[in-house]
Image: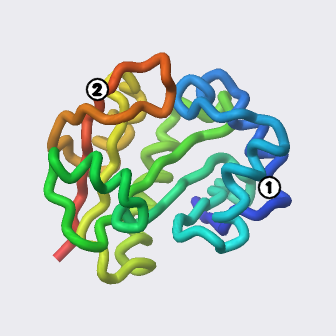
């Protein structure tokens, strides 16, 4: 069963280990020192930032992270996407990773995405949609989104997470069920 809870500062060593894994580092491009993880994830863990960092568990074992936020809470993010797609007020975005390399390629990403998106409609009752931009070269990620029921709605020229990448992104969307 997939469950999650808010990331806490106690989880930072595990997150640091995950961020250093080659399959994660390729797309997330985060520093992995204790100080860097605390700097980049501390405010959300302490509830001082509007985003949610969710530590995902499979049958009680931590396996991944999902970040969830309202796009309106991050004006630069909003301004980058707004010229390309319709962004109704309250739209939510997610990002995700599977930490353990032994668990990739087995459908876990799809299950995580599907579960968090389904919970978003309850957790954020005014959210009309979930939008996910993903780098065009990250086929594993966009395939997981498609399998989870999101549809590609646009191509966007936006800032990549990793500076070695170009700006090509696919944007995926799922609307609140009616």
Q: Residue 172 in the image: x percent, y percent?
A: 26, 46
Instruction: Name the residue located 71 percent from the left edge and 33 percent from the top edge.
Output: 31
Q: Residue at x 77, y 40 (%)?
A: 16
**Disc 2 target residue:** 168
Q: Residue at x 16, y 50 (%)?
A: 85
| Frontmost residue, 83 versus 90 | 83
User: Which sits earlier in the primary sequence, circle 2 or circle 1?
Assistant: 1
In the depicted structure, whether residue 135 falls above or below residue 115: above
Measured from the top left, where is residue 154 in percent x and y?
16, 40
- Above or below residue 60? Residue 166 is above
Q: Residue at x 24, y 72 (%)?
A: 89
Q: What is the quadrant of residue 168 in the picture?
A: top left
In the picture of the structure, the residue carrying the numbered disc 1 is 11
Number of marks in the image?
Answer: 2
Marks 2 and 1: which is nearer the front? 2
> Element at badge 2?
strand
């Amino acid at each position: 069963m997939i469950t999650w809870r808010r990331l806490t500062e106690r989880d930072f060593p595990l997150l640091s280990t995950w961020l250093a894994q080659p399959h994660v580092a390729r797309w997330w491009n985060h520093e992995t020192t204790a100080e860097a993880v605390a700097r980049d994830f501390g405010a959300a863990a302490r509830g001082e930032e509007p985003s949610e960092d969710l530590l995902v568990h499979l049958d009680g074992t931590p396996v991944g992270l999902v970040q969830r936020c309202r796009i309106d809470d991050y004006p630069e993010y909003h301004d980058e996407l707004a010229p390309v797609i319709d962004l109704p007020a309250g739209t939510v975005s997610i990002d995700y990773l599977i930490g353990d390399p032994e668990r990739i390629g087995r459908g876990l990403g799809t299950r995580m995405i599907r579960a968090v998106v389904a919970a978003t409609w309850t957790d954020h009752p005014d959210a009309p949609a979930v939008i996910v931009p993903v780098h065009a070269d990250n086929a594993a990620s966009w395939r997981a989104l498609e399998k989870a029921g999101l549809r590609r709605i646009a191509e966007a020229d936006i800032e990549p997470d990793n500076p070695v990448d170009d700006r090509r992104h696919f944007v995926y969307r799922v609307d609140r069920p009616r």
